[in-house]
Image: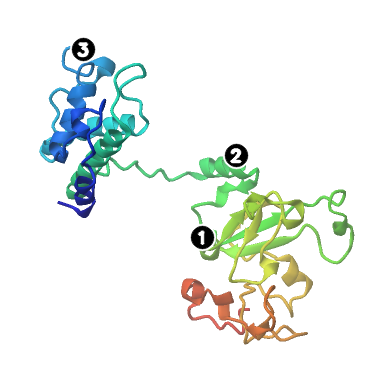
Amino acid sequence: MTAKRGVFLAGFALAATSGTSALAQTPISPAALERTVLEDYCVSCHNDSRLTGGLSLERIDLSRLAANAEDSEVWEKVVRKLRTRAMPPPGRQRPSEQEYESVATCVETVLDAAAAAAPNPGRRPAVHRLNRAEYTNAIRDLFALEVDGTVLLGSARDVEFKTLHDPERMPGQRSMTLDWPCVEGLRLDEARHPLTTLATGVYGQDLPNQNGAPIRLVVPWQYGSKSIKSIVSMTFMEQEPDCTWKRAAPNEYGFYANVNPEVDHPRWSQAQEWRLGEPGRRETLLFNGYVDQVAGLYAGMDLRVNY
């Protein structure tokens, strides 16, 4: 007997009062409990003759569930009806709340034990690998992004992201600070990493314009310049993308932009950082603290050269 069922049996006996059923007056074993409730309240409709709702409870036996696994589906229906108080229907004599809870708990315990003893995950759906056209259409329909799918499954090694170019809505693009639209890129293994995210929201809300709506890139182990905003296209490429910040200041911004405290920016040290909400500075961690997750992407590379 499990601890769960032991607690249930110990607490099941109820004081006899006028108007209570015989079930509530005497302690009863789980095996007899469910049968008694079914006989008193359910079988009059759900039997082999009437088959109300296409369901018969006349012959099923919870104590034999292990030998009759096909009955599991019937017992799952019974539990759902008991938990929602949908059986018996309104207007018919109904069990007490204690009886509802006790029978449902008893059935769930037996179902859980049977499932643990003989797991049956069912048929796993086949994995369908998208072809170029399907992938292109899926990205367009999901994210409203135009993706060049003709190079997919080919020799592409990088992916280029391009931001929206709309000086009317983005007045900052009228300046000559950068060569607009903004372009960023990742190697495909970086783009496929589980930490790399195409974000459409922040703090449980839709992404606001100033944060890069409708969709932006988030690469947490790299500097913020890699997390391009307001993406409108992705292109898979055989060569390294010509990234905006690297093109604008190649001595300051490399393609990888990995957080590396041992490589200083030409105009300041990156060995320490100051996090919002903290009183002082702390040591900057390699890869922003994600060494265990991403260091393998750069194995064998000189991180002072490939910065």
In the drawing, what numbered circle is on residue 192?
Answer: 1
For mark 2, give the secondary structure: helix
x then y, percent, for residue 164 = 75, 51
Q: Nearer the viewer, mark 1 or mark 3?
A: 3
Q: Earlier in the sequence, mark 1 or mark 3?
A: 3
Do the residues bearing badges 1 and 2 touch, measured as CB atoms within 8 Å? no
The quarter of the rendered structure image containing the C terminus is bottom right
Q: Nearer the viewer, mark 3 or mark 2?
A: 3
Q: Is residue 264 visible?
A: yes
x then y, percent, for residue 137 = 57, 40
Specify the farthest residue to the top: 50
197 relative to 61 in the view: left or right: right
Residue at mark 1 to residue at mark 3: CA–CA distance: 58 Å
Determine the residue positioned at 61% across, 48% down: 148
Compared with residue 237, is residue 138 higher up or lower down, i.e. above or below? above
Residue at mark 1 to residue at mark 2: CA–CA distance: 20 Å
Of the pair 51 and 180, the residue shown nearer to us: 51
Of the pair 64 and 172, the residue shown nearer to us: 64
Disc 2 designates what residue? 141
For mark 1, give the secondary structure: loop
Q: Is residue 119 visible?
A: no
Mark 3 Cα shell of 10 Å, populated few (<14), some (14-19), many (≥20): few
Determine the residue positioned at 19% across, 51% down: 6
Q: Which residue type does callout 3 highlight?
A: Arg
Q: Which residue type does callout 2 highlight?
A: Asp
x then y, percent, for residue 87 = 31, 24
Determine the residue positioned at 16% across, 30% down: 35
Mark 2 Cα shell of 10 Å, populated few (<14), some (14-19), many (≥20): few
Disc 3 designates what residue? 50
Residue at mark 3 to residue at mark 2: CA–CA distance: 50 Å
